[in-house]
Image (cartoon, rainbow, N blue to C red):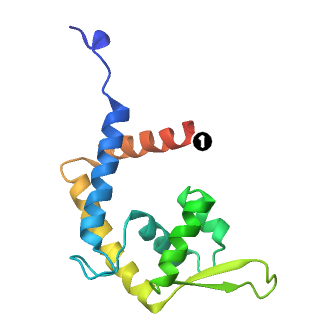
Amino acid sequence: MTDARRRPPRLVFLVTAAERQMRRWIARRGGRHDGDAGNGHGIGAPAAGVLLHLADHPGATIGEVTTALQASPAGASGLLARMERADLVRRHADPDDRRTVRLDLTPAGAAALHDARAALDDLNDRLTDGFSPDELAVVARWLEHVTDALR
């Protein structure tokens, strides 16, 4: 069978399966607040995203964090409430507009961020092993295309 007549790769299945495995790996690496194995911070992929965003954007609003995570307002609200109860983030009113709620990392959140960055460095090393920079650039371009095409 020629290349033109071959069935295309099952990209949706492959991306979904890869995403599921990455989330499981992050969850195993992160542990939980109840003392299970891991770093003890309970950092899953969404919480790591919050920590990384707040590290680069201290004082971000809840809306800004929600947009950065591409999350629903309800999902982000629940995640942020759990992170606040775990003392990873703190909410405070904007001094210029008391209706606006801003978020910052706590010292525990900064420690969890350190662990999350180490885990992500390890994960990126595993995911990129054996691929050239040119191959990885094509993968990154395709994933960005998927994100943009499905907005």
Q: Determine the residue positioned at 35% across, 32% down.
A: 11
Expressed as whole percent of the image width and height from the top left, the position of residue 83 reads 48, 78
Above or below residue 4? Residue 131 is below
**Residue 53 visible here:** no
Does residue 103 sit above or below 64 in this rendering?
below
Q: Can you say which quadrant of the picture contains the N terminus?
A: top left
Q: Nearer the viewer, residue 15 or 141?
A: 15
Q: Is residue 47 visible?
A: yes
Residue farthest bottom in this picture: 107
Please identify the residue farthest to the left as the structure is shown. 130
- The number of callouts visible is 1
Give the residue displayed 25% in from the left and 60% down from the top.
Answer: 25
Q: Is residue 144 left or right of residue 59?
A: left
Q: Is residue 92 left or right of residue 82?
A: right
Label 1 crowd (10 A; few <14 / some 14-19 / many >=20): few
| Residue at 54 percent of width and 76 percent of height | 81
Q: Is residue 82 left or right of residue 4?
A: right
Screen quadrant of the C terminus? top right
Near-viewer residue (37 or 124) = 37
Q: Secondary structure at mark 1?
A: loop
Vertical order, 36 against 68 (above or below): below
Residue 85 drawn above or below residue 21:
below
Nearest the eye: 51 or 81: 81
Amino acid on which disc 1 is placed:
Arg
Q: Which residue is mark 1?
A: 151
Q: Residue at x 23, y 76 (%)?
A: 38
Residue 105 placement (x, y as % from top left):
51, 84
Say which quarter of the image contains residue 149: top right
Q: Residue furthest right?
A: 97
Measured from the top left, where is residue 49 in percent x and y? 46, 66
**Relative image position of residue 6 (x, y in whole percent):** 27, 14
